[in-house]
């Protein structure tokens, strides 16, 4: 769960429709609307961005033919939509990691953004995805 970018105390529940900053309450939303924010404000604490992938690397995902092939699978697309819309994304991710197709997808994403030849997480998965 990510922390509110305004008060930095509570878990964020919402996103500003204009700038996508995370906030936890109506009070924080109003504070955000009064005080101008920019990307540097959002990322000013190291723990806020330590696990984030740089935009340049994320853009590499769109160039992966292997990922495109995996995303042709309707089951994987539905699974990704379910994770995205879940109230408890952590639990949904844990459940998804039990699905071999999702593990294969995750491995391929990591391979692209880490730019290495990762070994698959599950036995029997092809190394030449």
Image (cartoon, grey):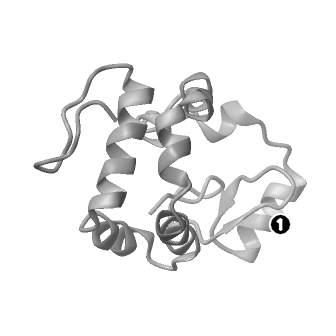
Question: Relative to 94, is 70 above or below?
Answer: above
* Coordinates of residue 127 in the picture (x, y in percent): 23, 33
Q: Residue furthest left?
A: 123
1 horizontally vs 59: left or right? left
Query: Residue at position x 38%, y 19% from top?
Result: 115
| Closer to us: 73 or 87 | 73
Q: Residue furthest bottom?
A: 87
Q: Secondary structure at mark 1?
A: helix
Position of the C terminus, as image quadrant, is top left
* Residue 54: quarter of image: top right
Question: Relative to 44, is 70 above or below?
Answer: below
* Coordinates of residue 99 in the picture (x, y in percent): 29, 67
* Residue 114: quarter of image: top left
Question: Relative to 34, is 59 above or below?
Answer: above
Query: Residue at position x 52%, y 75% from top?
Result: 82
* Coordinates of residue 30 in the picture (x, y in percent): 83, 66
120 horizontally vs 79: left or right? left
- Residue denoted by label 1: 30
Q: Residues within 10 Å of mark 1 (few under 14, many from 20)?
A: few
Query: Residue at position x 34%, y 59% from top?
Result: 101
């Amino acid at each position: 769960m990510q922390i509110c970018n305004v008060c930095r105390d509570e878990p964020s529940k919402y996103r500003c429709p204009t700038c996508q900053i995370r906030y936890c309450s109506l009070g924080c939303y109003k504070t955000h609307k009064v005080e101008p924010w920019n990307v540097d404000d959002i990322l000013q604490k190291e723990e806020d961005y330590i696990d984030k992938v740089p935009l340049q690397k994320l853009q590499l995902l769109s160039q992966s033919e292997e990922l495109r092939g995996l995303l042709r699978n309707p089951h994987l697309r539905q699974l990704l939509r379910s994770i995205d819309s879940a109230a408890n994304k952590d639990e949904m991710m844990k459940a998804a990691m039990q699905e071999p197709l999702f593990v294969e997808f995750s491995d391929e994403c990591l391979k692209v953004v880490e730019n290495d030849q990762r070994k698959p997480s599950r036995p029997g998965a092809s190394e030449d995805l």
